[in-house]
Amino acid sequence: MSGWRSSCTRVASLGYGQGRRPLWSERNRDAERVRDILRGAGLVEFGDTRPGFVIGGGRVSTSFLVAYTGPGRDAAMEVAAYRRCWLPS
């Protein structure tokens, strides 16, 4: 039982992101930076009751995948908004 307690009370090595998401690695931290950029542009992150963006590829790739998780009719508009965060107009 003591191992369980110690693992639950560990402090994330790079702090915490929004919603107290633990940032255990540089990769976690970088994904949180991508989320911050998207949120800063007024875009919404996926949640239990709302569609929005998700970040993937956190363990294997040098690039992150940003995807929209809502109705198909909104997808093109959302993806275009994600692209504007990184690409010049």
Image (cartoon, grey):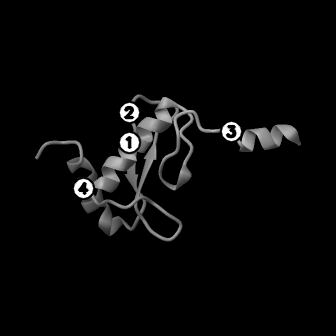
Q: Mark 1 or 3, which is nearer the eye? A: 3
Disc 2 to disc 3: CB gap under 8 Å: no
| In the image, farthest residue toward the bottom | 49
Mark 1–mark 4 distance (CA, rounded to whole Å):
17 Å
State the residue in front, 28 or 72.
28
* Vertical order, 28 against 73 (above or below): above
Measured as percent of width and height from the top left, residue 85 is found at 24, 48
Residue beneath label 4, please? 81
Quadrant housing the N terminus: top right
Mark 2–mark 3 distance (CA, rounded to whole Å):
28 Å
Q: In what element is the residue under mark 3?
A: loop
Q: In what element is the residue under mark 2?
A: loop
Mark 2–mark 1 distance (CA, rounded to whole Å):
13 Å
Residue beneath label 3, please? 10
Q: Residues within 10 Å of mark 2 (few under 14, many from 20)?
A: few
Instruction: Report the amino acid beneath label 1.
Output: Arg
The earlier-in-sequence mark between 2 and 3 is 3
Residue beneath label 1, please? 33
Q: Residues within 10 Å of mark 3 (few under 14, many from 20)?
A: few
Q: Mark 2 or 3, which is nearer the eye? A: 3
Can you tell which mark lies on residue 63?
A: 2
- The residue positioned 45% from the left and 69% from the top of the image is 50
* Vertical order, 40 against 4 (above or below): below
Mark 2–mark 4 distance (CA, rounded to whole Å):
18 Å
- The residue positioned 71% from the left and 43% from the top of the image is 9
Q: In what element is the residue under mark 1?
A: helix
State the residue in front, 25 or 67.
25
Mark 1–mark 3 distance (CA, rounded to whole Å):
22 Å
Disc 2 to disc 4: CB gap under 8 Å: no
The earlier-in-sequence mark between 2 and 1 is 1
* Vertical order, 10 against 48 (above or below): above
The earlier-in-sequence mark between 1 and 4 is 1
